[in-house]
Image (spheres, rainbow, N blue to C red):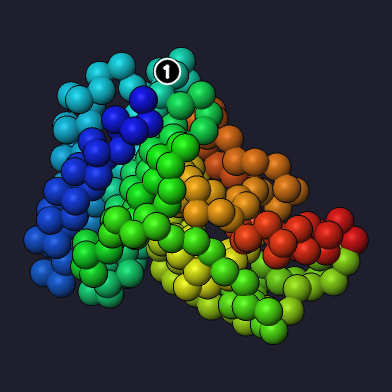
Amino acid sequence: MPGSDLPLILGAAEAAGQIALRFWRAAPQVWEKPDGQGPVTEADLAVNAHLERILRAARPDYGWLSEESTDNADRLGKDSVFVLDPIDGTRSFIEGAESFSISLAVVTHGRPVAAVVHLPATGVTYAAHAGGPATRNGAVIAPRVTPDLPQVLTNRTALDAEFWPGGVPVVKRNFRASLAWRFCLVAEGAFDGLISMRPAWEWDTAAGALIAERAGARVTDPSGAPLVYNAAHPMAPGLLVAPPGLHGEWMARRAG
């Protein structure tokens, strides 16, 4: 049940955060992944090993999809799957910045049902489960819309005219390193929305997507379709995340 999975993943994420902090600002070993996939540190691997040991022992019938584990097609036959990024924002972690997170979700029949995004360096934890509210350190959160100029987490490329036949949205661009955290910042009303036209891995989006949805935001791909998880190729073609009115405006501009 989603409610019973949430305490499990909350405890696991917070303990994993303590492991990450042992390496943070302590010159961890860093390697480059093949094919330009970016860096990985010994902290990523240690956090991943901890989470896999704890979670798979607690839910041996669940599948497993992690950025730092070799993918196994066995997960495709599982009703429920852990989907996680042990450290989302690895480059920021390496630089000693606070803006990295542990992103952890349970996906059942293609939909996230329990989610945690934990920022160890700041002690902030976002959480949600299907049917319940989204929270930040236990307090219920909700999105916002700034009427004059929406503050949106995006990049310049996502606002290219080719993506917006009906006119490019007028927004103020902002950036944060962890994609999982960006969902949460929209969920709590720190920013008005999130736009990405880049493919996004499931482990970066599953937890944040549920938190944003339970807070009251709409979460879709750029065509307006809902995100579906535990896919054979675990990637979405992009993201639109915003309160319903702003999301609807963006979809109208996408349609032309």
255 left or right of 2 in image: right
Horizontal and vertical percent position of residue 236: 59, 44
What amino acid does circle 1 point to? Answer: Lys
Instruction: Specify the quadrant of the image occupied by residue 64.
Output: top left
Q: Residue at x 75, y 48 (%)?
A: 223
Q: Which residue is mark 1?
A: 78
Q: Which quadrant of the rendered structure holds the C terminus?
A: bottom right
Helix, strand or loop for disc 1: loop
Q: Residues within 10 Å of mark 1 (few under 14, many from 20)?
A: some
Q: Residue at x 58, y 55 (%)?
A: 217
Q: Residue at x 29, y 30 (%)?
A: 4
Let me know if residue 154 appears in the view: no
Horizontal and vertical percent position of residue 227: 60, 41
Horizontal and vertical percent position of residue 166: 88, 66
Q: Nearer the viewer, residue 222 or 5?
A: 5
249 left or right of 235 in image: right
Q: Is residue 200 above or below residue 170?
A: above
Q: Residue at x 47, y 73 (%)?
A: 190
Horizontal and vertical percent position of residue 211: 45, 50
Q: Nearer the viewer, residue 27 or 186?
A: 186
